[in-house]
Amino acid sequence: MQPGANIEMLMARYQQGDFAAASALIDHVSPQLYRFFAAQSFSRADADDLLQETWLRIHKVRHTWRPGEPALPWFYAIARHIRVDHYRKSLRTVTGERRLETLAASLPRIPSPSDQTEQVAALLAPLSAAEREVLEMLKVAGMSLEEVAGATSSSVGSVKQKVHRAYKKLRKTLGIGQKGGRL
Amino acid sequence: MRDREINDILESARSSDSPQPESLTRISASIRESLRPVRPLPPAWLLTAALALVCAAVALAGAARAGFDGIEKMAPWVRGLVFATLGIFIVIAANASVKAVIPGIRRRFSTGPLLSLCTLALLAALALSFRDYHVDHFVSAGIACLITGLLHALPVALLAGLILRRGFAVRPATAGWIAGTLAGLAGVSVLELHCVNFEAAHVLFWHMAVIPVSAAIAAIAAAAWHRLHRFLAP
């Protein structure tokens, strides 16, 4: 199945209680969600746990998706919520005081087995959590600006602004990295 | 490194890691037992209309009990300006409340700036309408109005929670903040219908204070409710 194809149809059948559709949806969407977690400095085991937790939450609130609406932003909005909850738990464990975004940037990076994921994580490391998230959704998950805006509960203008800032920061950092031989 | 090279690295990750097939089988199995047909949420416009109606009903019921003295004393243009601004703000806040409990829904404008703009517009409308710059019993009269406003905001917040109970807030504190703003607007409406104190300082400070106080209380309550749920979750 092509990315984005039939997700809405499967979702509608999932809402009607069709197990085959639910399984197909899990098979189709899980790799994207898994990479979303894996690219955020989580180990394979953490990404697996978060994926399972996300699906349990998706199952519980599946009635909140409305037929006719794009399903991908809906999945990502829930995955994002699970990830933020995970960060908050880590926040309490690690410092108890530091802010969420600081923690997201400072958590120890546990390399995933994939070279590409590791390369992406290294590339996006200088960005803030919000900028990293938006770039991952746009470029790694292949979502449109509108879909990313939906998933992050923001406007398209705000997403564009984050992307612009992210690229600016990356250009600057990579330029310095090339001179200094970091990359 | 050019933008295209950055894009190439990011796009190459599309075909990288995947979850273990056993994990997917486990997830499928875990939802199988509880898989039943579900009824999707009603359309957003219907929920928005329900919330706006609740606001109007509570404001009118509150003013009917306390008296419509304020609106009776207002000049016709002031009535038009104040209640039209309040009405528009209520519809916008109701719509934002609905969007806060539907994950992944499209937004034309970011909620924070939108509600801030509405608050400024309401402040401007009140500042234009009330130009009595005397100040009498600023604190005692103000506290009474603040309490009256908050007491009317409470039922709106509870009814909003009831109407939106099937939704899912991905950002519970923000959802609480928006619902609290909506409830606060019902409180302000009661005060504008009833209060005969037209001093600018009183209206601009104490009547408007109902909105942020109600929003803050609702945000704290929503965040606490979410934490409690997370704590009690197996």
Image (cartoon, coloured by chain):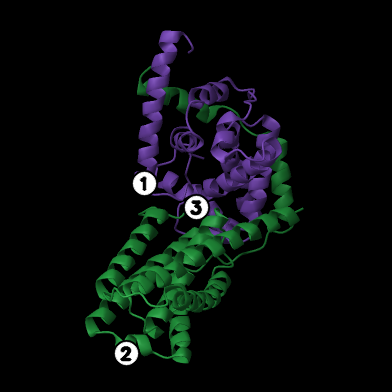
Image quarter of residue A90: top right
User: What residue is at 68 percent from the left and 35 percent from the top?
Assistant: A94
Task: Tell me, yes or no, if residue A167 can be seen here.
Answer: yes
In this rendering, position of residue B121 left or right of residue B98: left
Q: Which residue is mark 1?
A: A156
Q: Colour of chain A?
A: purple
Between disc 1 and disc 3, whose residue precedes?
3
Q: Secondary structure at mark 1?
A: helix
Question: Which chain, by letter, is green?
Answer: B
Q: Which residue is mark 2?
A: B72
Name above or below for residue B13 compared with residue A25.
Answer: above
Q: Disc 1 marks which amino acid?
A: Val
Residue furthest toward the left? B77
Residue A40 position within the rendered picture, expressed as x and y whole percent measured from the top left: 57, 33
User: What residue is at 49 percent from the left and 59 percent from the top?
Assistant: B100
Q: Residues within 10 Å of mark 3 (few under 14, many from 20)?
A: some
User: What residue is at 51 percent from the left and 51 percent from the top?
Assistant: A74
**Could you tell me which chain the residue with mark 3 belongs to?**
A
Number of marks drawn: 3
User: What residue is at 67 percent from the left and 46 percent from the top?
Assistant: A53
Q: Which residue is mark 3?
A: A8
Q: Disc 2 marks which amino acid?
A: Glu
Image quarter of residue A69: bottom left
Q: Residues within 10 Å of mark 1 (few under 14, many from 20)?
A: many
Spatial CA distance of label 1 from label 2 is 44 Å
Residue B229 position within the rendered picture, expressed as x and y whole percent measured from the top left: 69, 58
